[in-house]
Image (spheres, rainbow, N blue to C red):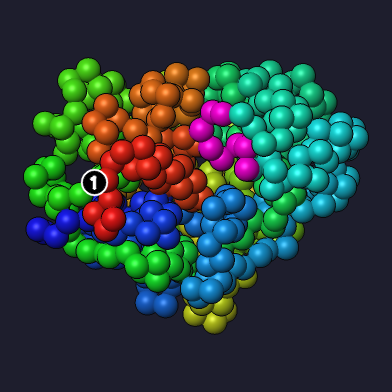
Amino acid sequence: MSTNYDAVIIGSGPNGLSAGIALARAGLSVLILEAADTVGGGMRTAELTLEGYRHDICSAVHPMGYLSPYFQQLKLENYGLEWIFPVVSVAHPLDDEPAVLLEKSVDATANNLGADRQRYRRIMQPFANRVDDLFQDMLGPLGIPDSPVLFTQFGAQALLPASLYARMIFKEKRAKALFAGCAAHSILPFDKLFTTALGLIFLASGHGVDWPFPRGGSQSLADALRDCFLDAGGSLQLSTRIDRFNQLPEARAYVFDTDPWQLATIAEDELPQRYKKRLRRYNFGPGVFKIDLALSEPIPWTDPNCLKASTVHVGGTFEEIEASEKVIWNGRHSETPYVLIAQQSQFDETRAPSGKHTCWAYCHVPNGSNRNMSQVIKNQIERFAPGFQDTILHEYTMDPSGFQAYNSNYVGGAVTGGAADISQLFTRPAIRFDPYSTPNKKIYICSASTPPGGGVHGMNGYYAARSVLRNIKSGLPLKNT
């Protein structure tokens, strides 16, 4: 690798690809290096169980991807991406009563919430009316918002712990349960500041779009981003693992789509000791245990309305989910965990043979856990879908070590780029005015361990690319000028 480039990107997850596209479209010569034999990071799809059953290995349903301000600019449908939209975004089953549904209409959702319906309308309608503006300000580093009134309205609620917010705002269990299922995407205990933020963001996203996913699997999104990058003039090299900085070709800038620990190791001789110590203190938070299932028929939910949703949040009441997330944060396993389920084959005929189905499900576990949670997950689903286990034809599991072996960024099974508690929410991966830069002016980081955090939306890569371009314009010379 002796060729010189303006920028070299290490890793081809959604953020590495987004950074590459932004830099290539700005006229830079860009090379992306990827350790695996396909691009995508967490956006890959494979036949994990039986022939003809296509399962998303990591990310599955992508409301943030569809609503991403940067992805919207790219017009990825021109590169073969087709989004599939379910009837509703989320179903949240409860014992002995109908499931709560997150529908695109605020009114339709609120009408399911009993005594909380007016309160829910009052809270969510302003965000639903301006979802694009909300995401423009939320999916980025700290700065002056484009919509300051909306941002302030959101922020005043978002900073609260989810436990306090739910008990202060909602009266009945249905609204609390729906909120809990969304807030639990934070993978934080509900007594942490800003856990309300994730709950509100995911609720708002469901009012902006019925949570979609790519036809054919998450790999389709990765492939569209790859083709967009190549169309912009970028270069790509697969099956190239980088362990040391001296393996890299000469470049004006190096952008790492890696976790902070890998950055500290690969750039060991290029970064000051104090900064590397901060990177190595980075907290990744809990991991996940996942199962993929080939099914003989759709999941037999007690409430068949659950089959209308791309995503099902299983965990029962607010109090049950709250207790489960606290247990896991404290390093123990829950016997009744919150389980996040995707059932893409309900809407995408490419995912399974005719008449058959897939199930994608995971629960949170302590970082580095080696406990097999497969039966615990299946028991939770069976609770709301009696007879579910009789439909299972084949099973494939991934524990935290499996996730880290699949993608080195998933340290201890942490798939969202690290804990987003108050100590790291705005300062990931270390406290810097520009979180994408490092003390070495040629080295940057763009992974989910930078703002705005995890999720398939590419905004971390987009903002990292802007940082590179600012520095180039202020004096870092281009190869091709």
Q: Which of 239 and 31 is in front in this view?
A: 31
Q: Which residue is drawn at 61% across and 29% down?
A: 144
Q: Where is residue 279 in the image (x, y as percent from the top left)?
A: 28, 26
The magenta stretch spans residue 351: no
Question: What secondary structure is marked by label 1?
Answer: strand
- Which is the main secondary structure of the residues drawn in magenta? loop
Neighbor class of circle 1 (other Cα within 10 Å; few <14, some 14-19, many 20+) is: some
The magenta stretch spans residue 140: yes
324 over 48 or under it: above or below:
above
Residue identifier under label 1 = 252
135 over 324 or under it: above or below:
below
Asked if one can make out residue 91 in the rendered structure from this viewpoint, the answer is no
Relative placement, left or right, of 213 versus 168 is left
Residue that lies at the very extreme toward the bottom in this rendered image: 354
Relative placement, left or right, of 77 versus 58 is right
Q: Which amino acid does label 1 sit on?
A: Arg
423 over 45 or under it: above or below:
above
Q: Residue at x 32, y 64 (%)?
A: 234
Quadrant including the C terminus: bottom left
Q: Which residue is drawn at 53% across and 67% down?
A: 76
Q: Position of residue 61 (x, y in %)?
A: 55, 56
Relative placement, left or right, of 292 versus 121 is left
Q: Give the range drawn in magenta.
A: 136-143
Q: Nearer the viewer, residue 293 or 180?
A: 180
Q: Position of residue 356 (x, y in %)?
A: 53, 75
Q: Quadrant of residue 25?
A: bottom left
